[in-house]
Amino acid sequence: MKIAVSACLLGIPCRYDHKGCYDKKVAALQEQHELVPVCPEMLANLGTPRDPCELVSGQVITKQGKDITNQLNQGLDEAMKMIEEQGCKLAVLQQRSPTCGCGLIYDGTFSSKLIPGNGLLTQQLLKRNIPVVSNEEFAVKLLADMEK
């Protein structure tokens, strides 16, 4: 099965702070599945390091107050195109992110407060009936159930 994965979870330094957040459980999926790394922020040419951003009333705003929604939407379109062309049947994404967040995202105040919600990529995937799990709730059982 092809699985879309937040590129940072595979150790790629694409986060706002130019770091990755390697997750060995997620990376281990490549033993039995093909992983497709995605990072909408990098596809939007936002670069790293960059100002952190959060969702504020549906818009993506940097900590400095700049609205980067339009630029990020271009990266989201590229990510969705790649995911669909690759035929990904599942996505394992980084929790808390304004794009990849799955189940929990920051509240838009840059105070590290988490609220229930989904990032923009997660929202698009779910609209297209592609299941999404966060790296923190990821379970091998889910994958086994999906392959049945």
Image (cartoon, rainbow, N blue to C red):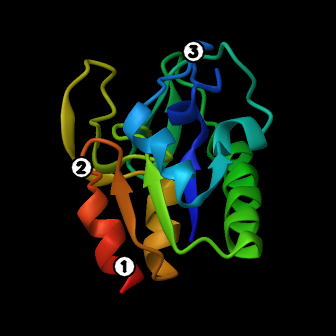
Q: Amino acid at mark 1?
A: Met
Comparing marks 1 and 3, which lies closer to the viewer? Answer: 1
**Residue at (51% x, 21% y) in the render:** 52
Query: Relative to the observer, which residue lies in front, 16 or 85?
Result: 85
Q: Secondary structure at mark 1?
A: helix
Report the disc number at residue 19.
3
Q: Disc 1 versus disc 3: distance between alpha carbons? A: 31 Å
Labels 1 and 3: the sequence-earlier one: 3
Q: Secondary structure at mark 3?
A: loop
Q: Amino acid at mark 2?
A: Glu
Q: Is residue 98 above or below residue 109?
A: below
Query: Relative to the observer, which residue lies in front, 14 or 124?
Result: 14
Q: Position of residue 110 (x, y in %)?
A: 33, 21
Left or right placement of residue 142 versus residue 50 in this view:
left
Q: Amino acid at mark 3?
A: Lys
Report the disc number at residue 146.
1
Labels 1 and 2: the sequence-earlier one: 2
Residue that sits furthest to the bottom in the current view:
148
Q: Disc 3 versus disc 2: distance between alpha carbons? A: 22 Å
Looking at the rendered image, the quarter that the C terminus falls into is: bottom left
Q: Residues within 10 Å of mark 2 (few under 14, many from 20)?
A: few
Q: Secondary structure at mark 2?
A: loop
**Residue at (75% x, 23% y) in the render:** 47
